[in-house]
Image: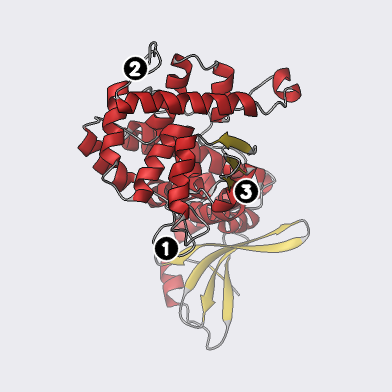
Amino acid sequence: MRENLTETKVRTLKAPTIGQIDVWDSRTPAFGVRLSKGGTKTWIAMYRKDGRKRRLALGRFPQMGVADARKAAKRCFGEIVRGGDPAADRAAAKAEPTFAQLAGLYLERHAKVHKRPRSAHEDVLMLNAELLPAWRDRKLSAIQKRDVIALLDSIAARAPIKANRVRALASTMFNFAIGRDLLEHSPVYKVPRPAPERSRDRRLSNGEICRLWTAVEVEPAKVQAVCKLALLTAARRGELLGMAWSELDLDAGWWVLPGSRTKNGIEHRIPLSPTAIGLLRALEKHRKSPFVFPSGRTGRPVANPQEWILRIRARAGLENFRFHDLRRTVASGMTAIGVPRLTVSKLLNHTEGGITAVYDRTSYDTEKRAAVVRWDRHLERLLTGEAPEKVVALHA
């Protein structure tokens, strides 16, 4: 059916009793209106692409008038002349994932597979707090560089370093999308960090170490052991809290961390000093879990000691103290009493670069054990009031 489609004519067209019918415009070829049984009137354009008929919905009447619909049809035909395929483009846009869908795919296929549980959990927290509220229903290609900058600026105004972390997560996610052929370009590309990174160098002085040790003495045995072992082993917080009895050989005096639990993925052998072994022996007497520091949840270790740290920090009067400061304190203190930097590096399980890292497979077990015993003795003298080994530039 062909008609001179005007506002009045379209308004008076009767809907079919069943199905739908198309009424084509007598003025503009391949442009018309589709009438549905329910009374809906939709502007359409018809064209051929690669020998196949394509039908493109342009809008609904009366929300879109005849003049605007005719203009939309002409724009469509112009795209076709230039080699485009408006219907296919629209279908692709509908199929394109939203940011929320990318987030789900990223967490399932990347974060849970390639990241440690704690890091994956931090990604979830940042997604829920910052990225999803801003872009949840946005198509990936619709998120532009200016959107990234605006979001990071708003976060940086209240939490500068957090803005850096959000930028890093967004960059990783968009690169993941590119790798899965969901996106061609990352909107984070060449967006600078919103804030300069500050390297934290807080180390406890001899007096602060004594105050800390005294402050933890009134804590439960589990809390005491965590804090004291951190000062005796220089272990990372996550490694220490997740310590399992299966990783310990108290008779030989070793704690062997599997590569699955270390930051660099390499097995790490940590020698245990006499004081450390004593702490663990005391806990072993009340062993009820495969984990040395079990949480209230069955079968899980303690995940976050922040409540302990705040309590101990206040009791010891240690301003701005954080758990990681203990690892830094041990490293600096060992170096200051003469332990070679290479041995300290081996104790910290730092990854080396270059040819040396490839050929130097020596475990340094002897040197590491000597270092922790020497550090243990240094702490004992310090805490009992004896003259400790000379410590040079502990805050350098």
Q: What distance separates the C-alpha of mark 3 from that of mark 2?
A: 64 Å
Picture quadrant of residue 186 = top right
Residue type at mark 2? Ala
Q: x%, y% of residue 134?
A: 39, 48
Read off the residue under disc 2. 387
Residue type at mark 1? Arg
Asked if labels 2 and 3 touch by Cβ distance under 8 angstroms, the answer is no
User: Which numbered disc flags the more N-terminal residue, 1 or 2?
Assistant: 1
- Mark linked to residue 297: 1
Q: Where is the C terminus found, in terms of image quarters?
A: top left
Read off the residue under disc 3. 182
Q: Is residue 82 left or right of residue 284?
A: right
Residue type at mark 3? Leu
Q: What distance separates the C-alpha of mark 3 from that of mark 1?
A: 39 Å
- Pick whichever, 368 or 170, lies toward us: 368
Q: Residue at x 40, y 43 (%)?
A: 226
Q: Counting other residues with Cα less than 10 Å from the Cα at mark 3, is it few (<14), some (14-19), or many (20 or more)?
A: some
